Amino acid sequence: MRELERYYRVLELEPGASLDEVNQAYKDLAFVWHPDRMPQDNQRLKDKAVSKLQQINEARDKLRSHKARLHVPSTRAASQSASNPTSQQTTTSKTTSRQAYSSQSRTPQEPSYQPPKPHPDLTGKDYSGANLTNRDFSGRNMSYANLKGANLSDTFMHKVNLFGADLSEANLFRANLLLADLREANLQSANLIGADLSGADLRGADLRGARVMIGDRVQVKLIGALLNGAIMPDGSIHE
């Protein structure tokens, strides 16, 4: 139990927190400690981030496994009941008793654990005007998706494929788009204030009219981003 408590502490949770709380804490901390968010010229911070991310991943995996085991129903009682019928029972009554017990043992309160299904392909998905704040689309294929006017604030989209997607007028306030594929994406009039586009591929993307500055300061993180051929907010083409 002490080891489980340590995993909860790594995720900054109280012991016994729900699986949803574990998953949310993991996403929050992974966002904070991702090595790509660290200054590229500070190896000490990058090494620390790698170590922290390993601890966070281990804690999440261990707690998920622990909670999965708690949801696997026990079959020992059923097998013992079936193997010790009274001598007065007939073959028919034995079968009926086993069936009745088996039916009772499969209660909704004890569902068997089912492994998570793979994420569906979201190519061309229509999310126009949708409220997707705080969702996790990391690693998903959303090429050519329609996200026009969608609320994607604080959304986790690390390594998401948004090739050719329509993000015009979308709210990407503080969205995590680390290493995202945004080639030829339409980002016209999108709100990118606070977004992290470090390492993202924006070649050929259209950012005309996108909100990227507060006053005279750029408020979008673009460390290592590829911008060749991108149409910038002022209409110029980046070379």
Image: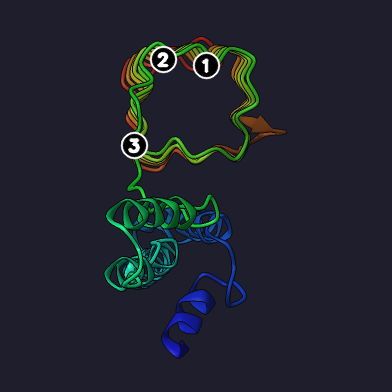
Q: Pointer 2: what residue?
A: 185
Q: Pointer 3: what residue?
A: 139
What distance separates the C-alpha of mark 2 from that of mark 1? 7 Å
What distance separates the C-alpha of mark 3 from that of mark 1? 17 Å
Q: Of callouts 3 and 1, which one flags the residue occurring earlier in the amino acid sequence?
A: 3
183 vs 2, left or right, is left
**Are the two marked residues, 2 and 1, in contact with CB atoms closer than 8 angstroms?**
yes
Q: Of callouts 2 and 3, which one flags the residue occurring earlier in the amino acid sequence?
A: 3
234 vs 46, left or right, is right
- As helix, strand or loop, the secondary structure at mark 3 comes to loop
Q: Pointer 1: what residue?
A: 167
Q: Amino acid at mark 3?
A: Gly
75 vs 28, left or right, is left
Q: Is residue 199 above or below residue 2?
A: above
**Foreground residue, 47 or 64?**
64
Q: Position of residue 56 (x, y in %)?
A: 41, 67
Q: Of callouts 2 and 1, which one flags the residue occurring earlier in the amino acid sequence?
A: 1
